[in-house]
Structure formats: C-alpha cells, structure tokens
Image: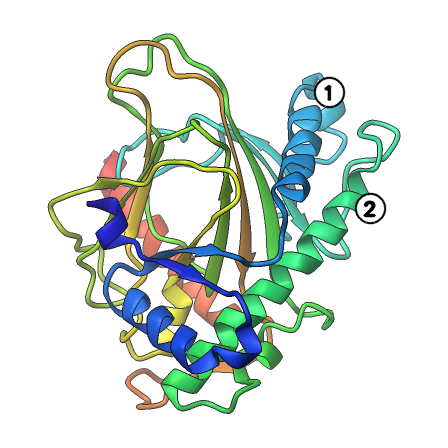
Amino acid sequence: MAERLVPVISLKDFDNRKEEITAQLVEAAETAGFLTLVDHGITIEEIEKQFAISKTFFELPAEVKGKTPHSRETNNGWEYKAQLRASTGTYDQKESLWLRRGSQWPSDVDVPNFEEITRTFMDKCAGISNQVLFCLAVALGFPEDYFLVANDVNKPDCLTQLRLIHYPASEDSVGTWRAGTHTDIGCLTLLFQREGEDGLEICPGRESHTSFAMGDTFTPLPAHTGPIVVNIGDMLMAWSDDRLKSNFHRVRAKDVGKSPARYSIAYFNQGRRDFVLQGPKKKYPPMTVEEYFTQAVQRNFARQQLAVA
C-alpha cells in the first residue's frame, strides 16, 4: 500500500529527464503530498556519516548539548521534549537540534568535524531541493528559477534549516506517538531515515492549507537508509493555491514491545523571510514568508489551546 501511495521517483540524469520527473513529482504532490527520491546524488556513506555526527551529539551530557541552547527567536539550537502537539495534548517524545546557517552551532571540540560534515550535507540537500522546486515552479506556471530565488540559502534572510532528531528508546511507549500528528509549516521537507527505525506514518486527505481535516487511514512508511522522503509543507500548499497537498504525518511507537531509538534528519526549505508569496491563481492575498509563518503559528497555537483545554 505504501509503495502505491508514496511513489519512488528517480532523479537520475536530471537535466535530460526534467519533463518526465516534473510529471511524476506533480502527480505525487497533488495526491499523497509525499514521495521518495532515489538516485539523488547523496551516497549512503555520506548519509551514514551525518547520522554518526548526529548520534555523537545526542550522546553528549545535557549540559554539553545545552551549550547550543534553543532560541525561540531564531528556532535554532538544542531542545528536549519541548514540542507540544495539539493532536495529542502532550509533548513529543524526542530531542532535536535545529541548525540554521549563520546561527550558533555545536563546537568541533565537543563533536569533531561537526561543522564541515554538516555544512557539506546541507549544501547537498539544497541542491536536491532546488531540482524539485525547479520542477514544481514550471508545473505551477512560475518562472523556472522562481522557487530557487525564494529559497536562496545564500541570502541572509533565508529561514531554511536542518534538524537532527533523536527519539530515545522506550520500554513503555506501546501504541503512543513519538511525534504527534502534524503538517510541516514550511515549503518543502527532505527527510532522511535509518534502516529499520520505523514509525513514520502518513495520512492524505487535506484540501486547504488552513484546514486541520484529514483522511481516516494512516499508512506506515518504512525507514530505509538512502532514499529521501519528501513532503509538501503548508506554505507551498498555499503558494500553489492548495493544488499541492501538505498532508498530516506522525511518528508512532511500536504496537508490541520496546521501541528502540530512532534517528532522523529533516531539511526544511522555509523560504526567505522578506519574499512575498502568492499563488499563480491568486486564491489568497499576498504576504511575506515571515507573515505566513506568524499566521500559521497562531493557527497552531489556537488549536493547541483547544486541545488542552
């Protein structure tokens, strides 16, 4: 079922297959809102090296990890079980390290080669994101470089981030959600998983970027090292006049027995703060990326208040 719902798309020979790849990307984005990329140019060895860096960081004592404190203003830094989900009324059972270019990062003294390896990994994620966004811009009728300009990581107002995530092993989490049901607020997410560390489930059925409606069935998406799971975010759904779907997903603990540790890495394309977004059909009024984030956070906060009331 998962293979039908979430198509596998190859980026091999991208320059000569742009039309074919665009058609495949659009079909997936208009339905599941999720797809899996292969032949994307990041080797398994490079992915495993980044996961090793992540694991080294999360194994540090809390006081060392806390040297890169989470900032609400920049959403950069280390946080521990800090994300409240409206869908569960509880905090996600995970810790994470948010990384934005130009913000504070862990020291190479604490995690050797952290910055060199991670910056190289982020650059490769940006290249893959640009290929996907190029195709989606063409499909929506924007100029070819439209989303590339809107998500230019070399601009100081770009909000794009890498997030290293660790779900600690648990003896008593049977049937619970390690990350509650949610959508991604930003534009486009690249997710890396490790072989056998399952738990991600997805649920199509959303028709509006401001709606919390969803379908009835969550489908597991098995974790493999190598392929990249890609999903549409709320911002891109709005930017496409709701044509491309930002659908709900969650991370579920095992139904039977102990849930082992799970590591994942997410690359969030979140646009440039001052860039004005509006869909080709102008279904919604124009607003800056920063204004969109502010409104989305307010909607989610209102939903959380209702959930815990």
Percent of width and height locating residue 270: 53, 64
Q: Where is mark 1, residue-wise?
A: 63
In this rendering, would 144 be left or right of 184? right
Percent of width and height locating residue 232: 38, 62
Nearest to viewer (mark 2 / mark 1)? 2
Residue 272, above or below 125: below
Camera-side residue: 131 or 101? 131
Crowd class of label 1 (few under 14; some 14 to 19; many from 20; radius 10 Å): few
Q: Quadrant of the C terminus?
A: top left
Helix, strand or loop at mark 1: helix
Residue type at mark 2?
A: Glu
Q: Where is mark 2, residue-wise?
A: 116
Residue 146, above or below 127: below
Name the residue rendered at 27%, 75% in the picture.
243
Helix, strand or loop at mark 2: helix
Residue 79: tell me if it is visible.
yes
Residue type at mark 1?
A: Glu
In this rendering, would 139 be left or right of 270? left
Q: Earlier in the sequence, mark 2 or mark 1?
A: 1
Crowd class of label 2 (few under 14; some 14 to 19; many from 20; radius 10 Å): few
Percent of width and height locating residue 122: 68, 54
Residue 279: tell me if it is visible.
no
Percent of width and height locating residue 120: 75, 52
Name the residue rendered at 67%, 30% in the picture.
52
Residue 59, above or below 35: above
Name the residue rendered at 32%, 39% in the picture.
250
The residue lying furthest to the left in this view is 216
Colour scheme shown: rainbow
